[in-house]
């Protein structure tokens, strides 16, 4: 009897925690999204107005598509960079492996705003790169001045450490001797990668993708500081509803849209993967 | 020779893990590399496989110099101690892997997988993933993956170390059977002398990166070339002593006089080994006249360990212990009983203090 109560208590604490800090705010957001705001006041009449605005207002649709493309591209770029970096740390890091991985977290010691502003100082019209170029007598690079490219660079910079860490951990748990086995049985190094290394780290790679994709989708600071006039992303537009415009209900609806989009993205990725094919053994025996 | 190692060495930092190894292995031979852990036997195997490059020397397989060939072009197969099955592939996919790499047509792949499933009795497990198999089943799949591609040689790196004793003995018989049926060389790395003795045609005893001796298994066991082999293969009793003035006996440190099989220079410091099962026991009841002469040691039985077909006796002899192993069909002795242990001079293996046979 005692064990059962202990078990319930153990399950109960996280349940209460999740309810209070996750489910309740989410529910209140969903409720708010079906209300209205008028002159900085919440009006409690149930309607679909916010969603109609989001679906028909051209700007919002543009922001959403731009955000999806941006998050997808940034996540892909992060994975393309993180793979060789993590692989090199595993192969050649030796006893400095942990240190090298931690080094990626160093920027996290400052705030996100600071990091984005630092990047603005690097990429902007009078930033380090363009200032040097102009001092050398060449033309500044326009595509990194307040553009979507600048936003993408900023997002890659922000989320690359997470993706590297996730893929590094995946590779760390990967038994590299399986590569030896593949080679012995006739696989060239490239073939061994395709047959063994990639599928067995696919799950980790997808987690890295999702952990980059979702925050990119709702990014607000990066597009505001780096994105320029045509760089508004969905998350940034959403933040504005809660700030300057005071249209909280619309903002809440945008939040719901982002939430659903993220879930659909995760499901789409998840459904395409047979976990067994990634060596996932979480199902246990049987 | 079908596989030839010619002066092969491998250096790690300042240590020679493999040191000038030269050996030849025949086409239909089962060879064991037997040595303690860290002796370099696995490194030697990985050099043959192509997973390690020798610092110096050449490796030839079937007349071709493969020293600079990567593993996937050597046509050898390997069975690993940790099995190393592909966890994201089913049993039949694991078995088909080497064949797919050989780009065989699908029909032939299916046929060969079925053949291996048959000879290794893996029927019914084809659709399972490795983590759904028992250790013994995983071992069979690993062996099957090694055999399915009909490799030029099968390299086995302590493949039975992770199995329990009964399963191990079953697999020993099976592995040996497949080797003779396929007619390809098996090179078997192990630190377990029983495995080496039960399966091999020839055994190479590896010590500190060098081949201590490479000979038929009976020679390795019955006529050890060095003190290390005498100590490492089989279980034996060791004595140290000095050859007496006549050159016919050895006075050991524990005060015993042992007769030598052949005369030696007087004053020569030697070490002697006698296998536990060569130590014969008789009751010390005074019926044996010269009960304390040369090669007859008066002992007391300290403990008896029953091994089934034979019994191990731990004997107290002065301030040391002796071990004897006698068949159960002989007279049994009880703890506390006084016995005479006989050492036949012919059964004594005698070495210099540096471990070599005296010249």
Image (tube, coloured by chain):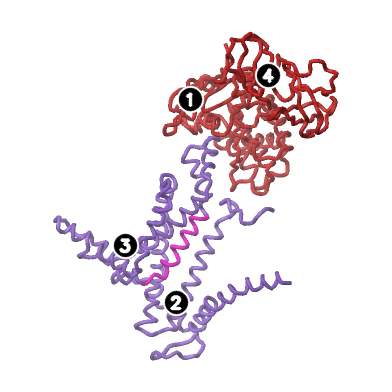
Chain colours: A purple, B red
Q: Chain of mark 2?
A: A
Mark 3 belongs to which subunit?
A
Instruction: Find disc 2 in the rendering and name its residue.
Output: A254
Which mark is nearer the camera, 3 or 1?
A: 1
Spatial CA span between label 3 and label 1: 58 Å
x and y, in percent, of residue B285 in the image = 85, 23
The chain under label 4 reads B
**Residue A149's mark?**
3
Asked if B161 appears above or below A135 in the picture, the reply is: above
N-term mark: 4 or 1: 1
For the residue labelled by badge 1, is the local secondary structure a helix, a strand or a loop?
strand
Q: The magenta stretch spans which residues? A: A203-220
Task: Look at mark 1 in the image and give the residue it sits on.
Answer: B19
Confirm or deny contact between disc 4 and disc 2 (CB under 8 A): no
- Quarter of the view holding residue B203: top right
Label 4, label 1: how far apart the Cα atoms are:
26 Å
What's the mark number on residue B222? Answer: 4
């Amino acid at each position: 009897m005692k064990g059962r109560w202990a078990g319930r208590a153990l399950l109960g604490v996280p349940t209460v925690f999740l309810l209070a800090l996750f489910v309740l705010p989410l529910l209140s957001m969903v409720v708010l999204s079906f209300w209205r705001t008028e002159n900085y006041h919440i009006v409690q009449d149930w309607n679909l107005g916010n969603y109609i605005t989001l679906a028909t207002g051209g700007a919002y649709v543009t922001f959403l598509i731009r955000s999806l493309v941006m998050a997808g591209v940034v996540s892909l770029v992060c994975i393309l960079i993180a793979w060789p970096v993590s692989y090199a740390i595993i192969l050649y890091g030796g006893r400095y492996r942990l240190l090298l991985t931690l080094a990626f977290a160093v920027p996290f010691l400052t705030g996100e705003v600071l990091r984005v502003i630092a990047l603005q100082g690097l990429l902007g019209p009078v930033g380090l790169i363009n200032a040097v170029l102009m001092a050398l007598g060449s033309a500044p690079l326009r595509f990194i001045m307040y553009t979507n490219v600048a936003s993408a660079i900023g997002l890659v910079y922000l989320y690359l450490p997470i993706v590297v860490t996730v893929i590094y951990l995946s590779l760390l748990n990967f038994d590299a001797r399986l590569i030896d086995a593949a080679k012995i049985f006739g696989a060239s190094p490239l073939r061994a990668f395709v047959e063994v290394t990639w599928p067995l780290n696919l799950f980790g790679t997808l987690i890295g993708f999702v952990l980059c994709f979702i925050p990119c989708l709702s990014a607000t600071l990066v597009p505001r500081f780096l994105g320029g006039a045509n760089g508004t992303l969905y998350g940034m537009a959403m933040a504005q509803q809660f700030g300057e415009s005071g249209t909280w209900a619309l903002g809440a609806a945008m939040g719901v849209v982002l939430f659903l989009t993220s879930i659909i993205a995760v499901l789409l990725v998840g459904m395409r993967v047979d976990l067994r094919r990634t060596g996932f053994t979480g199902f246990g025996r049987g | 020779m079908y596989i030839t190692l010619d002066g092969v060495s491998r250096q790690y930092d300042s240590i020679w893990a493999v040191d000038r190894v030269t050996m030849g292995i025949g086409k239909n031979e089962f060879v064991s590399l037997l040595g303690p852990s860290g002796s370099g036997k696995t490194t030697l195997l990985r050099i043959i496989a192509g997973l390690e490059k020798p610092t110096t020397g050449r490796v030839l397989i079937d007349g071709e110099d493969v020293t600079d060939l990567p593993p996937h072009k050597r046509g050898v197969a390997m069975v690993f101690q940790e099995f190393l099955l592909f966890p994201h592939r089913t049993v039949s996919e694991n078995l088909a892997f080497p064949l797919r790499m050989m780009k065989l047509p699908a029909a032939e792949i299916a046929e060969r997988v079925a053949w291996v499933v048959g000879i290794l009795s893996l029927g019914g497990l084809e659709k399972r993933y490795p983590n759904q198999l028992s250790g013994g089943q995983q071992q069979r799949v690993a062996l099957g993956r090694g055999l399915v591609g009909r490799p030029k040689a099968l390299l086995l790196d302590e493949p039975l170390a992770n199995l329990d004793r009964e399963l191990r003995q079953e697999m020993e018989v099976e592995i040996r059977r497949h080797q003779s049926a396929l007619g390809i060389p098996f090179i078997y790395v192990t630190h377990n002398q029983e495995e080496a003795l039960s399966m091999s045609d020839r055994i190479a005893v590896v010590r500190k990166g060098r081949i201590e001796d490479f000979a038929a298994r009976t020679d390795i066991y019955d006529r050890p070339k060095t003190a290390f082999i005498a100590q490492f293969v089989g279980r034996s009793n060791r004595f140290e002593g000095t050859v007496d003035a006549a050159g016919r006996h050895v006075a050991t440190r524990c005060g015993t006089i042992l007769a030598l099989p052949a005369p030696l220079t007087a004053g020569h410091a030697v070490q002697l080994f006698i296998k536990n099962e060569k130590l014969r026991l008789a009751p010390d009841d005074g019926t044996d006249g010269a009960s304390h002469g040369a090669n007859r040691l008066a002992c007391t039985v300290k403990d008896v360990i029953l091994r089934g077909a034979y019994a191990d006796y731990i004997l107290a002899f002065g301030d040391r212990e002796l071990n004897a192993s006698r068949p159960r069909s002989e007279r049994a002795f009880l703890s506390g009983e006084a016995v005479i242990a006989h050492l036949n001079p012919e059964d004594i293996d005698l070495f210099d203090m540096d471990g070599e046979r005296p010249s």
